């Protein structure tokens, strides 16, 4: 990695980060106008598959970023990644050749990383404006569930049996939906649509490692895995959900039912207990409310708990914290290893980047990572959509099917525009 240098210049405060994202080949991660968008590749850091892959990746990324020469008053270079859910898959991070960053409102930078003595790549950015009219809607034969809802219901029933026998406390079962658009899907257009519908979610896009053909994971996830700024650490796990409605009275009643639901509260408390246990090992003054709050996306209400703490020491980077937290019970289950075994037996699909960490870390160790939910793996004219539901002792198969259908809805609507 030695021999690389970083240069930076300011961009306008109203610069649209999506203009810095090249269709399908770069990286994009934004919430409420803040985030990063990158193109090109100055370096790639690889960690082989195995239970320690995230820690190895984190350590190698930290070394690589520290070795990049930069002016002391310039913003630090960053590495970006979409990491597969399973430890059985390798993990990689990329130091982009060019990245646009906005971490605070109006404070926008372009950072370029090049070999010493080399010129920065020519400016290739163009003004971006999304389309305003949808393409022709999909025909019914173009959308196919995988597995079938009946098979998913059977898996939920088997998971409930395991939970009631005391084998596990919670497991998160995913299902997918296959879409053939019969036209080339545009990841950039999907991002434009998703962030317009849910600006408070993390809109993201990243190439996928090890795909049989070039694929991009595109989505809008509501869940902050972890954020580190200086010595401050934040996390907002979600678990438990209910439907949203266009009618304000029905919508409020659905939120109230969620808050009062013993099934959803049990699903949520499992996650909160584990996140608290992990973060307490790193943080002083870790604070979080004893009662969750109800937060909404376009189609779904969620139970959420916000954590905030101060690091004991400066050493743990944002990616170190990711390594300690992943996978949380919000996307795997509890106890972790027993839930993993249940997933192998009950979930007949390869998650890939779905439910894995997606985000960025910089040379100072700061960074922001979400969990890749409400996403689709897009390749040419096809897309595989993912959605999951947390299963506990009181789960009802039909209700879990309905929950995953609601989570699919925003993506299916976005694909009509993509």
Image (tube, rainbow, N blue to C red):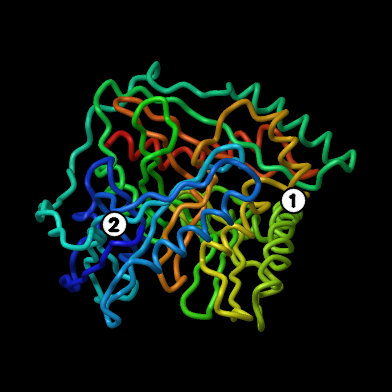
The answer to whether 150 appears left or right of 142 in the picture is: right
Instruction: Please give the name of the residue rendered at 66% of the width and 45% of the height, measured from the top-left corner.
Output: 332
- Front tag of 1 and 2: 2
Position of the C terminus, as image quadrant, is: top left
For label 1, count other residues whose C-alpha is less than 10 Å away and answer few (under 14), some (14-19) or many (20+).
some
Q: Position of residue 381 (x, y in %)?
A: 30, 25
Local secondary structure at mark 1: helix
Residue beneath disc 1: 263
The label on residue 322 is: none
Local SS, label 2: strand
Residues at discs 1 and 2 in contact (Cβ within 8 Å)? no
- Toward the viewer: 331 or 120? 120
Disc on the earlier residue, 1 or 2: 2
Q: Is residue 63 left or right of residue 311?
A: left
Horizontal arrangement in the rendering, residue 89 relative to residue 162 (left or right)? left
Picture residue at 43% right of the left edge, 57% below the top: 359
Instruction: From the top left corner, tell me how far across and down residue 267 is, in percent.
Output: 71, 52
In percent of width and height, residue 224 lies at: 51, 61
Q: Label 2: how many residues lie within 10 Å, few (<14), some (14-19) or many (20+)? A: many
> Label 2: which residue?
37
Please identify the quarter of the rendering in which residue 265 is found: bottom right
Q: Is residue 286 above or below residue 255?
A: below
206 and 188: which one is in front? 206
Q: How many angstroms separate mark 1 from mark 2 (CA)? A: 39 Å
- Location of the N terminus by quadrant is bottom left
Residue that protrudes farthest toward the right in the picture: 165
- Seen at 28% across and 62% down, the residue is 4
Q: Position of residue 28 (x, y in %)?
A: 32, 53
Number of numbered tags placed on the structure image: 2
Q: Relative to 103, is 382 above or below?
A: above
For the residue pair 206 and 405, the one nearer the viewer reads as 206
Task: Give the residue displayed 60% in from the left and 67% down from the top.
Answer: 293
């Amino acid at each position: 990695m030695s021999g690389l240098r970083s240069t930076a210049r300011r961009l306008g405060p109203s610069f649209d980060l999506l203009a810095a994202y090249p269709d399908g080949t770069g990286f994009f991660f934004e919430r409420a106008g803040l985030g990063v968008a990158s193109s090109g590749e100055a370096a790639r850091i690889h960690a082989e598959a195995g239970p320690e892959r995230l820690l190895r990746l984190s350590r190698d990324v930290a070394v690589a970023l520290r070795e990049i020469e930069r002016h002391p008053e310039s913003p630090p270079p960053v590495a970006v990644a979409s990491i597969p859910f399973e430890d059985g898959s390798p993990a990689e991070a990329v130091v982009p050749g060019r990245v646009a960053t906005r971490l605070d409102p109006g404070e926008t930078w372009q950072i370029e990383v090049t070999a010493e003595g080399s010129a920065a790549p020519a400016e290739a950015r163009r003004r971006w404006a999304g389309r305003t009219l949808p393409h022709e809607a999909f025909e019914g034969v173009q959308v196919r569930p995988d597995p079938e809802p009946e098979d998913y219901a059977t898996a939920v029933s088997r998971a409930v049996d395991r939970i009631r026998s005391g084998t596990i406390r919670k497991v998160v079962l995913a299902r997918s939906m296959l879409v053939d658009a019969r036209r080339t899907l545009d990841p950039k257009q999907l991002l434009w649509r998703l962030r317009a519908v849910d600006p408070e979610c993390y809109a993201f896009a990243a190439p996928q490692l090890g795909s049989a053909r070039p694929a991009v994971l595109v989505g809008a996830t509501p869940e902050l895995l972890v954020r580190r700024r200086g010595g401050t650490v934040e996390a907002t796990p979600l678990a438990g959900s209910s439907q949203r409605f266009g009618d304000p009275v029905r919508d409020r009643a659905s939120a109230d039912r969620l808050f009062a639901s013993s099934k959803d509260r049990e699903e949520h408390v499992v996650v909160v207990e584990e996140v608290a246990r992990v973060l307490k090992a790193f943080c002083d003054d870790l604070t979080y409310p004893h009662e969750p709050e109800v937060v909404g996306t376009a189609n779904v209400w969620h139970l959420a708990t916000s954590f905030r703490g101060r690091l004991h020491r400066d050493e743990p980077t944002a990616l170190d914290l990711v390594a300690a937290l992943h996978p949380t019970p919000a996307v795997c289950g509890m106890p972790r290893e027993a839930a993993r075994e249940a997933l192998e037996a009950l979930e007949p699909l390869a998650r890939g980047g779905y439910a894995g960490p997606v985000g960025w870390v910089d040379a100072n160790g700061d960074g922001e990572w979400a969990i890749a939910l409400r996403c689709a793996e897009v390749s040419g004219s096809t897309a595989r959509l993912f959605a999951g539901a947390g299963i506990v002792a009181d789960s009802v198969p039909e209700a879990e099917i309905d929950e995953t259908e609601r989570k699919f809805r925003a993506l299916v609507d976005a694909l009509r525009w993509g």
